[in-house]
Amino acid sequence: MDHNAKILLIDDDRGSREGLGLLLRQEGYEVDTLDSGEAALQALGKEPYDVIITDLILPGASGIDLLKTVKEMDLPCNVILITGNASAETAVEAMKEGAFDYITKPIDFQKLQLLTDKAVEKSRLVAENLYLRQQLRGKYKFDNIIGSSSAMQEVFTCMEKIMNTDSTVLILGESGTGKELVARAIHYNSHRKQKPFVAINCGAIPAELLESELFGHVRGAFTGAVADKQGKFEQADQGTIFLDEIGTMPVHLQMKLLRVLQEHEVERVGSSKKVSFNVRVISATNSNLDELVEKGQFREDLYYRLNVIPVPLPALRERLEDIPLLARHFLQKSCKAMQREPMNFTGEAIQALEAYDWPGNVREMENAIERAVALADGLVIDRKDLPAKISGKQGVEHALHFPDIPEAGLDLQDIIATMEKAMIGQALEKSGGVKSRAAALLRINRTTLVEKLKRLNLQ
């Protein structure tokens, strides 16, 4: 039970009101009491209550009226109704209007306490999710792109500067870092937002079909071309075209793409007629285009044409402070998609998420949390609910090499100290010397790690 939870108790019977209020305060709750529905309506929204416990029959307004008002105001609190009438109709109406639960008189205080504890827990989860949504609408201005780290703030600042220009953008980053999300955010926050956003993955389409997909074709241009077809550039006219995995484009198409970008005109396959268009070009790659240019696998002139404004996206391991915020966002998203009640993480689960390297970046995290929500038994995601490679269940025993004990015996404390030094050194090496990251890898607090470094005389 949360000892900081705040309860609003409404009952027109003074004895019942004062008695319940005293018992709830003895359990650690902060309790405000009122004697009428009218007074309660005036109080709603002025104070942040976790739970409202109200008699059904009140002067001024009924408990059902209060419940309806709480729902209309979208307050993140739960309502428990007290009724002297145990009829099925009353219960059905209360639950239909969104009551957390109801309890009949005479009141079983132990039952009321259990209901209140559960209602507080659910209210706190709802409030946390509401706060997260407000953060996304406020500080984090671009939908679905989440981050408070300095690395992501640099990305947001760059996006804000370029979104209302028509400059060509090249988004750089590892797979799973959200390159298409950034491209869409730039488009939908620009003056072209009412026009099409057309995306094409150049690496997912066979080379022999990519030209037709990009530039279109006329009927009879090749076997199977039974009708004229617009290409992606024509479809994106007045809007934005997103060329994903541009580094995979065959060299023979790169020359034609360069000409299209220079002339703002396209020729469909099988036609000599030129069609004009006006599009903003955003491309993305997880390849090192500089290296591809040196190897002759990517045209240098096309590279300069595309790389007018580069937007590098950090890998998830480079913005560790964003992991809890991202994790809770994906948790909320998965709960909603699976129609599950709001859930939360334990501290150990968050610690495991922070300690993992995330080679698949944000996409891997989303998939891992979706899996955890699907398999979890309760309303809390623990370390054990995460995939084994993230929770650390695999490989711990194999990573440790225990010496054989000689006949003469050994000094256990020396062995432990040696092993501790080795593990701390390895964690610091893996974390690039960042103590908070090393502490997460070792599943200890940063202050504990600092103390161990001093005790073991490690720098």
Image (tube, rainbow, N blue to C red):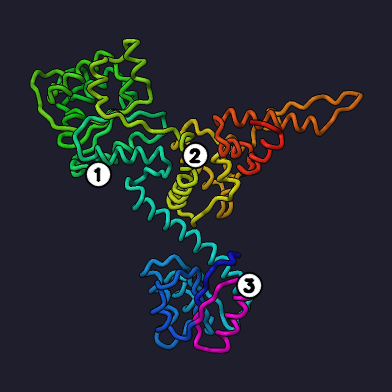
Residue picked out by circle 2: 320
Tag 2–tag 3 contact (CB < 8 Å): no
- Residue 30 is covered by the magenta coloring: yes
Left or right, 282 with reference to 285: left
Magenta region includes residue 413? no
Q: Nearer the viewer, residue 115 or 140?
A: 140
Q: Which residue is mark 3?
A: 27
Q: Nearer the viewer, residue 149 or 58?
A: 149
Label whose residue precedes the other's in the sequence (2 or 3)? 3
Q: What secondary structure is found at the residue carrying circle 3?
A: loop
Please tell me which of labels 2 and 1 falls first in the chain: 1
Q: Residue at x 45, y 69 (%)?
A: 48
Residue 369: % across, % down: 50, 43
Q: Quadrant of the C terminus?
A: top right
Q: Which amino acid, mark 3?
A: Glu
- Is residue 87 visible to us here? no
* Residue 148 at least partly seen: yes
**What's the CA distance linking mark 3 and mark 1?**
50 Å
Q: Which mark is residue 189?
A: 1
Mark 3, other Cα within 10 Å: few <14 / some 14–19 / many ≥20: few
> In terms of image quadrants, where is residue 185?
top left
The x and y percentages for residue 1 are 60, 65
Instruction: Name the kind of residue labelled 1 in the image.
Output: Asn
Q: Is residue 201 left or right of residue 10?
A: left
Write the start and end of the magenta stretch as one range: 9-33
Q: CA distance from mark 2 to mark 3?
A: 38 Å
Name above or below for residue 319 compared with residue 3.
above
Do tag 3 and tag 1 residues touch (Cβ < 8 Å)? no
Question: Could you tell me residue 77's position as x and y percent?
Answer: 46, 67
Q: Could you tell me which secondary element the residue under label 1 belongs to?
A: loop
